[in-house]
Image (spheres, coloured by chain):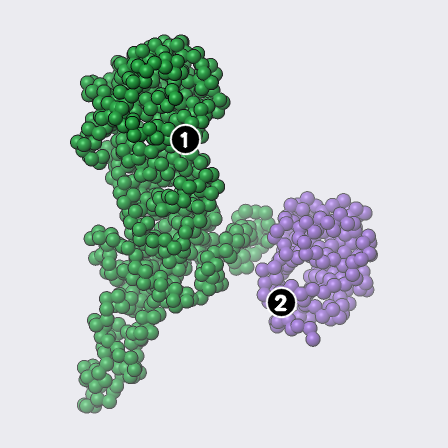
Amino acid sequence: MAIPEEEVERARTQDPCTSNASPSQDHRFEKLRGVRWRINLGILPSSPSSTIDELRRVTADSRRRYAALRRRLLIDPHLPKKGTNSSDLTIDNPLSQNPDSTWGRFFRNAELEKTLDQDLSRLYPEHGSYFQSSGCQGMLRRILLLWCLKHPEIGYRQGMHELLAPLLYVLQVDVQYLTEVRSNYEDQFIDLFDELAFQERDSGAYDFDIKKVLDDSMEEEGDENGPPFGSTKKKKPKRFDELDTETQTAVLLSDAYGAEGELGIVLSDKFMEHDAYTMFDALMYGGSSLGSVSVANFFVYSAPNDSVTGLPPVIEASAALYHLLSLVDASLHSHLVELGVEPQYFALRWLRVLFGREFPLNNLLIVWDEIFSADNSEIERGVEADLGFEFRIISSPRGALVVGMAVSMILYLRSSLLATENATSSLKRLLNFPEDIDLSKVIEKAKSLQTLALEINAHRDLFPKASRKPMRGHSLSVDSISLGSSPVGIVPESYWEEKWRVLNSAEEEQRKKKAIQRPKAVKKSWSERVKQRLSRTESDPSPAEANKNGNKPSIRRSLLDDLSRQLGEKAIDPPEFPNPDTDIERSSTVSDSPSVDYEENNSDKGIGENQTDLPLSVPENESEEKSGTNIFREKKILSGTFQRLWRLGRNLSSEETSETKEAKPIDSEDGKTDSDSTAGNGDGLKNTAQSMLEQIQVIESVLELSSPENMTENGRLTVEEALRELRRLGNMLLSDM
Amino acid sequence: MVLVLALGDLHVPHRAADLPPKFKSMLVPGKIQHIICTGNLCIKEIHDYLKTICPDLHIVRGEFDEDARYPESKTLTIGQFKLGLCHGHQVIPWGDLDSLAMLQRQLDVDILVTGHTHQFTAYKHEGGVVINPGSATGAYSSINQDVNPSFVLMDIDGLRVTIYVYELIDGEVKVDKIEFKKTSTTNSAP
């Protein structure tokens, strides 16, 4: 049961891009992955000052625990239980239905083993010489069996074996390296007393002068490895101190006389199973804190009680992935979303096995090096910590790196993904990650995305929990309504109130960021909206609008300016809200187009052109109807800015308001656009264009002042709103054509 | 660890309607690897039922069996043990240990399983074991009116076999255990 030599070499010489220059990194075990991973996973003490002895002790302890567990849980029904007399056969016979009987447990274990075997037999066939050997399979089976018995709430899920296999592999590589060292530096390991030269006995006394012996034989002297030994070996032995640090470490770690004796040999063949179990356990239950990556959570089907979004962790993580992607590359994101590629289709496999199926084993080891070296503790949260993170996975650097890695992989496939036309081909592309890739580039990108991801979460703190639920509920209801062909987009009054009550500074930040980063427009479908809500993406102007980008930007800028002016005037405060409401009512009575079931009493159109925040079932429907038109996809929380916008809109085109009132149902049934079209006057158009330009100008000015990262609050607000307004207006114009 | 179920003399439907429900609840598919049946089922339905418990079914002809194709006796090897199977009405006197031992030597088996007496017995004899699982339904026999339903489960593990006897006495299932170790490994027949 050994790994072929060349594989060992390859595995070890691939030095990971451990660019973590953190001073707390223990650099003693650079080449010993097994030890390094154990340190990173928290099994071995991680401070560089911990001595070899301490490492050995901790190792020994963990091994003892595993051995005890094994003895307890692996059942041989033939061995009588201690203390039971054999007359209690009514319980302990093989056919007993009693769940407590040893036979019962034996049969249950046998069932579990059968499931395990199904997976294990298909594990890593390309490295079959190691992984398919019976010894290795036996170890894997036992480890998984014991882990599942210890954690019955999760049991065994497919994929766990793929997580365990590389851990065992890494340990095996280390052990084989050790044997190599042994063969090269045999003398360091063997206590050879027999060949001690006694020739130089001058006085009859047993005055064994070491130095003399050494002088004579010119051989080295081991120091802490035991008494000196003379050696007549052909190899050139070195003194222990002369060995390179690496080998020294290896020797010390495996000294049979060190702390805890044989049990403490950190790189040990006999105890690989124990070590692998401990590593696996640490990986699955990564940290005590909530935020850290515990891969076991990805196998759970239901949402934990304290989750903000109420989603199972793996879905939540997939949503986080898509969210990050939307921040970084919105066009790709929207393309995928439009195709209907939900993140968990591929992310499930990626996350559950930590990319084990996407990379060949050697690359995977490098990737895991990176992931494990990221700290797994939850990041300090602000005072509003009780609000919880929306994406729990991002709340630790390791989790953020995992998400970053996933996004970086998606970005790597960007061109081919953008070219796909349906969900199946995209998934095919994603699930068959190419083999020959420049891994270091992918990892670099992942690291940069990690920092971005951590940033998101830091800002997300301020986002209260309360707004989430109504929004979701609303989106769902709107979704169901809009499945028909009629535009519904009614928003309940309470919804708007809720929205504006919510502070969304973080929100706007991100929207602004996103908006700045990618001006492309995408089409989104209805079904994506819920996901969008969850992933908090922002809509983009339509493709049509993008085409007109050339002549539009100026328009937008002007709009932006306008808006910023308005915004600058006042602060957000409640009393302003009722205004829009009344107007809404007025308009709603007038427009009669969206005749279909309105759950809410506010009509979308009625709210006027300014409803940029409207999740906009209306615009969405519009798009359905007119397959070319763009859609609003704003989802979001309202803030006082909403009123501003609304007011702005009214100011902008008072004549348009009147038009709204005359809205007639067209096939598109969108009152707002209808109003525009019916009005059809150049005035309205011009005004719209003007406003858009102004908006764009506002954005530009804000941008000039500061880079996206350190914009002021005001600046952000401004830009956000400006963008929203732009979008809306653009849509309006489009629908006109 | 091979589990082998030994039973017989059910006499369904002539003398008994079915296995006792407590026995039926214990005989769950999936646990047992082989079934050896001494005969007198008597009908095909019982044969099918036994097949559902375990697909590897070995059965010999009893005098009341309606399927005439079953053999008179059978030998099989499970693990290190050679098992012999015969209904037992051919061996006279019925249930006599010496006569059964003759049959055991004749078949050259370590474990001989016979029935017909509807009475559970297990003898360790001359380096082998002679087992009678009794009647699984408790059907009456010509020599015994009051029969307790019983069957035998053998756990063959290497050179050791553990024989669990399940008897239904006064409505309760009683279990007993007999251990038997073989002294030498089985040689392949020349």
Q: Quadrant of residue B72?
A: bottom right
In the rendered image, the vertical position of residue A736 relative to residue A388, given as above or below: above
Q: Mark 1, residues whose alpha carbon is within 10 Å: few (<14), some, or many (≥20)?
A: many
In the rendered image, the vertical position of residue A592 relative to residue B120, given as above or below: above
Q: Where residue A203 sits in the image (x, y, percent)?
A: 18, 90
Q: Colour of chain B?
A: purple
Q: Where residue A476 sits in the image (x, y, percent)?
A: 43, 26
Depth check: give the residue in front, B123 or A256: A256
Side of A310 where B179 appears, left or right: right
Q: Amino acid at mark 1?
A: Lys
Front tag of 2 and 1: 1
Q: Can residue A145 be seen from the camera position used here?
A: yes
User: Which residue is rendered at x = 21% and y = 72% of the image?
Assistant: A242
Q: Amino acid at mark 2?
A: Gln
Q: Can residue A603 be seen from the camera position used here?
A: no
User: Which residue is rendered at x = 43% and y = 12% of the image?
Assistant: A664
Q: Quadrant of residue A17?
A: bottom left
Depth check: give the residue in front, A626 or A218: A626
User: Which residue is rendered at x = 64% and y = 45% of the image?
Assistant: B25
Q: Chain of mark 1?
A: A
Side of A267 where B4 appears, left or right: right
- Report the residue marked by disc 1: A524
Dot 2: element:
loop
Residue B75's label in the rendered image is: none
State whether discs 2 and 1 lie on one chain: no
The chain in green: A
Placement of the C terminus of chain A among the 4 image quadrants = top left
Placement of the N terminus of chain A among the 4 image quadrants = bottom left
Q: Quadrant of residue A545?
A: top left
Depth check: give the residue in front, A578 or A233: A578
Q: Where residue A343 sits in the image (x, y, percent)?
A: 41, 39
Residue B80's label in the rendered image is: 2
